[in-house]
Image (tube, grey):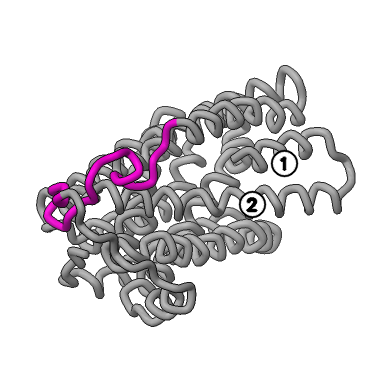
């Protein structure tokens, strides 16, 4: 977190392309280490039957952060220029890094409590700690797991559509509706706000109605996400601002609901508590590949074919992800 804050600060004061590229590469690397660590901590503190609810609540953090960023960035850019949008958040991240350093505990044992049992109860004091897996054992366990591969590939499709809306929806509103930067940013803030609700609802549904099976909820939400994406461009072309906001909220709901399950709960379910961090890192890695496609792939489609082609491609990625997750519909969750 501290290094990421430093990189964002440096980015705001850099001018040379290669400097910007190096700084942003380091920033991306440092940020990528955060989520797997968080998933591992959640696996240590919450049993299987509470993971959906716990990850849903945790997932609201980056939704609200995203919404705040959209609003704050629009104001900072208009008031102080684009560099302020990188410098100002760095200070907040430094404060949070200090809080985490002082307060966060990885396991119940680190807080003076006995370890968690599979049934959710705290184990008796003096229970021996489980043996740690080697790097080779962890990699072999993750990369040979068919269920994790299916989730990871489906997640690449989800991140393609997620980053498509994150990176391109403001420009889309500007070009199609003639919106200003700040107005587009405010509308786009609805996306993660709807996502926060989706994360909580999706996590609760998996624990309440599906015995902690995530695939049914993920598959249905991804299919619906693909349908809404197909019609989104027509809604924006119609120019009804209220309907656009409603659509963005629904898209956020259907994007971040499966997102937090796939990269948060599924690594714990299919990777077990011992390999949760590595499983999360593997799935997240595939997601970044989808995000990369959303970047240069969308740029190519826009240049040669227009917005409809880009949105139909995003929708196709959602449908493929839904089909892959549907194959895991009845797979039982590990209780380890």
Q: Position of residue 160 (x, y in %)?
A: 51, 59
| Residue 241 place in picture, x, y as percent | 46, 29
Look at the picture and state if 20 lies above or below 137. above
In the rendered image, residue 123 lying in the magenta stretch gets the answer: yes
Inspect the magenta stretch and tell me whether residue 122 lies in it: yes
Residue 271, visible in the rendered structure: yes
Q: Secondary structure at mark 1?
A: helix
Q: Label 1 to label 2, Cα distance in Å?
A: 9 Å
Which residue appears at 51% of the width and 49% of the height?
Answer: 34
Q: Residues within 10 Å of mark 1 (few under 14, many from 20)?
A: many
Residue 28 circle label = 2
Q: Residue at x 72, y 41 (%)?
A: 7
Q: Residue at x 43, y 32 (%)?
A: 103
Q: What is the number of the mark on residue 235? A: none
Q: Is residue 235 left or right of residue 217?
A: right
* Left or right, residue 197 beside residue 139: left
Which element carries disc 2, helix, strand or loop? helix
Secondary structure, magenta segment, majority class: loop
Front-most of 218 and 146?
146
> Residue beneath label 1, please?
7
Q: Is residue 180 visible?
A: no
The residue lying furthest to the front in this view is: 126
- Tell me the quarter of the picture where residue 131 sits: bottom left
Residue name at image x 66 percent, y 36 percent: 5
Q: Sequence-wise, which precedes: disc 1 or disc 2?
A: 1
User: Start and end of the magenta stretch?
Assistant: 103-124
User: Residue 138 at what x, y percent from top left?
Assistant: 42, 73
Asked if disc 1 and disc 2 are in contact, CB closer than 8 Å, the reply is: no
């Amino acid at each position: 977190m501290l290094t990421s804050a430093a990189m964002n600060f440096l980015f705001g004061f850099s001018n040379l392309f290669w400097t910007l590229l190096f700084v942003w590469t380091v920033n991306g690397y440092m940020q990528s280490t955060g989520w797997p660590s968080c998933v591992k901590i959640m696996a240590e503190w919450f049993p299987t039957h509470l993971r959906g609810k716990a990850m849903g609540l945790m997932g609201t953090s980056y939704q609200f952060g995203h919404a705040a960023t959209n609003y704050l960035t629009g104001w900072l850019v208009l008031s102080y220029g684009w560099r302020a949008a990188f410098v100002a958040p760095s200070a907040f991240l430094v404060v949070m890094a200090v809080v985490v350093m002082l307060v966060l505990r990885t396991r119940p044992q680190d807080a003076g409590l006995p370890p968690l049992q599979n049934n959710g109860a705290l184990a008796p004091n003096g229970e021996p700690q489980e043996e740690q897996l080697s790097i080779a054992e962890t990699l072999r366990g993750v990369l040979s797991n068919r269920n994790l591969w299916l989730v990871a590939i489906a997640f690449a499709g989800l991140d393609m559509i997620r980053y498509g809306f994150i990176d391109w929806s403001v420009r889309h509103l500007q070009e199609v509706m003639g919106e200003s930067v700040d107005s587009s940013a405010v509308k786009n803030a609805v996306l993660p706000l709807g996502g926060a609700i989706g994360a909580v609802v999706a996590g609760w549904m998996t624990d309440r109605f599906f015995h902690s099976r995530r695939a049914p909820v993920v598959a249905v939400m991804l299919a619906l996400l693909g349908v809404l994406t197909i019609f989104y461009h027509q809604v924006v072309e119609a120019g009804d601002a209220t309907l656009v906001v409603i659509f963005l909220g629904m898209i956020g709901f259907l994007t971040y609901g499966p997102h937090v399950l796939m990269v948060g709960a599924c690594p714990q379910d299919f990777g077990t508590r011992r390999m949760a961090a590595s499983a999360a890192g593997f799935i997240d890695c595939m997601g970044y590949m989808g995000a990369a496609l959303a970047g240069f792939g969308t740029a190519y489609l826009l240049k040669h074919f227009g917005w409809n082609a880009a949105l139909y491609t995003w929708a196709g990625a959602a449908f493929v992800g839904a089909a892959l997750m549907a194959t895991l519909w009845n797979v039982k969750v590990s209780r380890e």
